[in-house]
Amino acid sequence: MSGAGLLGPTRKMPLTASAMDFFQLFVPDNVLKNMVVQTNMYAKKYQERFGSDDAWIDVTLTEMKAFLGYMISTSIHHCESVLSIWSSGFYSNKSIALIMTQSRFEKILKYFHIVAFRSSQTTHSLYKIQPFLDSLQNGFDSAFRPSQAQVLHEPLIDEDPVFIATCTERELRKRKKRKFSLWVRQCSSTGFICQVGFTSSNVFIQFQQALKYTVGPKIYVHLKEGSGADGLDALKNKPQLHSMVAKSLCQNASGKNYIIFTGPSITSLNLFEEFEKQEIYCCGLLSTRKSDCTGLPPSMLNNSVTPQSRGQYRIRMKGNMSLICWYNKGYFRFLTNAYSPVQQGVIIKRKSGEIPCPLAVEAFAAHLSYICKYDDKYSKYFISHKPNKTWQQVFWFAISIAINNAYILYKMSEAYHVTRYSRAQFGERLVKELLGLEDTSPTH
């Protein structure tokens, strides 16, 4: 299989490129100006309906950047509320609090919108954010060439501050819950998130409509409407939903010979065969409990009654598809059309040494291990602010992903060799540049 092209950024950034320069590869000024226009339009519409607000004046581009800066600062300092910046408590931040008053910030937060008016052609509940998500996805596509090996998964999101452990049970119940689940297609060599999807429970009809009628790259969002036991938890083990997620995340990957690694909830014979027709190849961990095992031989799904030695495995093939049952203190099953089952690999354990395995198993372990390390490092930098409205929750998650992607591009640029900012320092630098502060040196 041929590779997917050169890996890395598509644009060479100058040595003097700032954190803001990298961030604006995904969120440029024209997008921010649209936020200004739409916020002012919504404020006007709101006041026409509910009465004038004498304290409101139209927001400017400078104020909108500062507004984003305050929100992004919660991804670094992890305060429970963004309003803590103006407080006298532990999470106060006097160095940035003077740029805008708390009352002005709260006014902008009250009226903040991406799309002020609903179009007559709008059919889904996230019309308020879809133009921003489309723009963001186009930025991801144009700024970076991913490696051939990629992973579809649900990334870890460390969304709760450390002090949440001290909350009472009542306080925990009052915390705002996410109404969606986040899925990504991620470059396994760099951690760059190439495609994003959000899912929830009224999914099946909406997903099929989106796949049928949508042209071009999209960030897909499908939401839970209502509450109860049929919410997000009920979706965790639905292979049909996860298969739809996989198709949407790989819609613009056809013909590129990508190798996609998947977890048990996505892995299925039908999906892998469909992807193979699009020149997308797969390697996935299989679970008899979580995976759609339709079409797979039952004899390979049952554990052997005879004792097995570590590293032993069985293989069944159908065309280019291989089903591998490998033993290592338990049975692990893999489905793949990306690797030949006769190619040998090895898993290296600190205590056990080398354990023989098919190359597909070694590749799966290596690529997933990198993604886990990425999650451990970057998941703590998601914006802590928790709005009630779902479209705003999705927006701040998308902004967090854009900043992480911007940092990856920064680390791969020549600018990194000049300044060598850590992720926390990069975030602080971005906040100060959005706020227009002259002192942009990081404090960490």
Image (cartoon, rainbow, N blue to C red):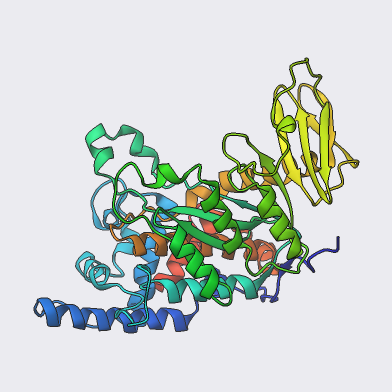
Displayed quadrant of residue 396? bottom left
Give the answer, above or below, for where 248 lies relative to 348: below
Residue extending furthest left?
51
- Residue nearest the viewer, comparing 155 with 111: 155
Q: Residue at x 73, y 43 (%)?
A: 335
Give the answer, above or below, for where 259 lies relative to 299: below
Q: Is residue 122 visible?
A: yes
Residue 437 placement (x, y as % from top left): 41, 71
Q: Residue at x 36, y 45 (%)?
A: 230
Q: Residue at x 57, y 75 (%)?
A: 138
Residue 187 placement (x, y as % from top left): 67, 58
Residue 350 horizontal side relative to residue 31, left or right:
right
- Residue nearest the viewer, comparing 148 with 98: 148
Displayed quadrant of residue 15? bottom right
Q: Residue at x 51, y 49 (%)?
A: 379
Displayed quadrant of residue 324? top right
Q: Is residue 440 visible?
A: no
Residue 314 horizontal side relative to residue 380, left or right:
right
Give the answer, above or below, for where 144 lies relative to 361: below
Residue 418 placement (x, y as % from top left): 67, 65
Label count reads 0
Residue 228 placement (x, y as % from top left): 30, 44
Of the 4 image quadrants, the one containing the N terminus is: bottom right
